[in-house]
Image (cartoon, coloured by chain):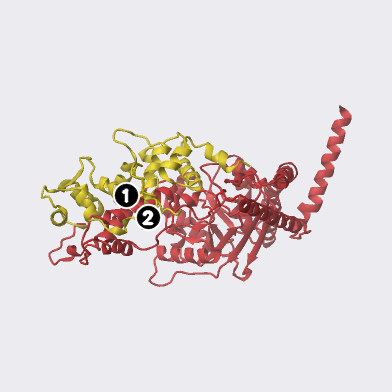
Chain colours: A yellow, B red
Amino acid sequence: MGSTSSTLLKIPNVEVLMQETGFSPAHMIRLHDRFKALDKEGRGHLCPQDFGAIKELAMNPIGDRIIGAFFCPGKETVDFHTFVKILAHFRPVDKNRPKEPNSPEPINSRSNKLRFAFQLYDQDKDGKISRDELLKVLQAMLGMQVTEEQLESIADRTIQEADLDRDDAISFEEFRKVSPEILHSRCFIKV
Amino acid sequence: MEGAWEIAFVLFQVWLSIVVGLIVLPAMFGVSLGFTDIYIRVLVKTLEWATLRIQRGQKEQPTLPSQSANGIIEKDDGSMEEEIGELRRSHPKNLVGGDFTMCDAFYFCKKGIENIVEDQVTQRFTSEELASWNLLTRTNNNFRYISVRLTIIWGLGVFIRYCILLPLRITLAVIGLSWLVIGTTIVGLLPSSNAKNWLSDLVHITCYRICARGLSATIRYHNKENRPKKGGICVANHTSPIDIVILANDGCYAMVGQVHGGLMGVIQRSMVLSCPHVWFERSEMKDRHAVAKRLKDHIADKTKLPILIFPEGTCINNTSVMMFKKGSFEIGRTIYPVAIKYDPQFGDAFWNSAKYNIVSYLLRMMTSWAIVCNVWYLPPMTRQDGEDAVQFANRVKSAIAHQGGLVDLSWDGGLKREKVKESLKEEQQKMYSSMIKCLFSPNRIVNY
């Protein structure tokens, strides 16, 4: 009969992680169990195939991109630390957090949530969503259901509406302006 | 030394006669001496006490995380349409047109992240989590040390289960299976006659009853008037190989399955001597028509026992029912659905074949407290006009899920081994494309 604190201690650097991400001890244990369950071969880290084994994710039109968001460029594995930090983006915003001027922005701020979504589009990480990148996402979400022309016209219209500085690409600021307010109150990890 | 061996031998004989006299013989005649009932009642009282102690312990120390059986996700159960609609409505420009907006991607992103944290399919292939601990180490998820008394009770439980119950149960299992092999071989020597069928049924039922005692199984059968009849097909949800013992305690079935080697093979071969079962070679299983034909021939013969089939094709953890394979529903006869629900408090019956092999699984079964389950016989169903096999299978599946209090899922149990079909992704894309109004202009061309 182990104690909770001993289960927590098995997770390396758990105190730091909880501080950075804001997850409670119960959540950390759950996420650790989930990490271990996904890591079927017990290697201590996850690779893209481990994510690919989640059936509902494989069915998601932008599943590949979501999986890609977990892996830093050039890296083929994800450790628990990174896993939790990425998931922390989706915690509900802490309404009562005191606004200290020098403290780093929390991972689950609205801005960081939007940045995560932005990066799903901006795969080459140049800070802008080009027309091509937009087309690729549209292609993923709509597949064979539409023609090339329809995709292009949707992409054109979207850029026209959002692109304020007329550089034929959508920067993060422009993306932020066209994103809904509701993004941050709908995030779903139960506290 | 001689003396010690003699004493051991005598003790063994005494032990054996007690077991046979008090357990095996009554079991064979379907008589219960009440031991199991008393045991279960004591067990229930002990577990209730343990639960209260743990809850009290948790209240006293509020820093303890309380166990949430529903997981970490607060799911929005809205449909794709509702959720994307909400995202769009809160758009700064308040688009009513229903056209593509960049935030639509956020819906898919959210769903994806939800599934990474918890998904419906993987969760069905691990044991069900208990709301409160049942004093078995194997179900211990974060239950911490509460009090000395609880630890003592737990230790006592370990002793009882491993040193008293386990040897008893192994003895019973050995007796039961040996009786099955010997009995069916003897009956097989008789010429075909009504007497032979009756004896064969007797041998099978008595053997399964002994095996059921060997698991301390308490089974409650409901609606016995709907019990499967000869010439019919009995379908049930699948949780473990023990399902066969559970069902066969109350009726005789013809089993369907693959031929195995080793001990299983011996049992299979002797069972077939006394009454017909349907065993397939591995190579035959691939030919769906051959399989269907053999099953059809079997049920066409009204003197043969009803077939027992588990259409899910794999073991699920008894919290849900997964897709039923349509093969059994194409044969076109009366289907007798049966729902089996185990009570996880006394022992988890789910066989996680990825984690445990059959022997370690059986040992885990025999060192659990008990197997307590409910079996509901549902009214027979037949395929309606205009219904195809898949719709029929789904209808039966829903009936079973509803009766057993299980979640009705349309996921294929075989997915635990295979990849997701492209068609499922296409369905998602199709649903999403219907939400983009500009695509419905007159000159829309859709590529398929």
According to the picture, the residue beneath numbered tag 1 turns out to be A113
Q: Secondary structure at mark 2?
A: loop
Which residue type carries mark 1? Answer: Lys
Q: Nearer the viewer, residue B205 or B421?
A: B421
According to the picture, the residue beneath numbered tag 2 turns out to be A187
Q: Nearer the viewer, residue B60 or B375?
A: B60
Residues under numbered marks 2 and 1 in contact, where contact means CB atoms less than 8 Å apart: yes
Position of residue A27 measured from the top left corner of the image (x, y, whole percent): 48, 47
Determine if residue A109 is in view. yes
Q: Quadrant of residue B206?
A: bottom right
Residue that extends furthest to the bottom in the rendered view of this protein: B385
* Neighbours of disc 1 within 10 Å: few (<14), some (14-19), many (20+): many
Position of residue A118 measured from the top left corner of the image (x, y, whole percent): 25, 48
- Of the 4 image quadrants, the one containing the C terminus of chain B is bottom left
Could you tell me which residue is drawn at 46 percent across and 48 percent down? B284
Position of residue B393 measured from the top left corner of the image (x, y, whole percent): 45, 63
Q: Nearer the viewer, residue A12 or B334?
A: A12
- Of the 4 image quadrants, the one containing the N terminus of chain B is top right
Which residue type carries mark 2? Answer: Cys
On screen, residue B369 above or below B2: below
Chain letter, disc 2 residue: A
Chain letter, disc 1 residue: A
User: Number of numbered discs present?
Assistant: 2
Q: Secondary structure at mark 1?
A: helix
The first of marks 2 and 1 along the sequence is 1
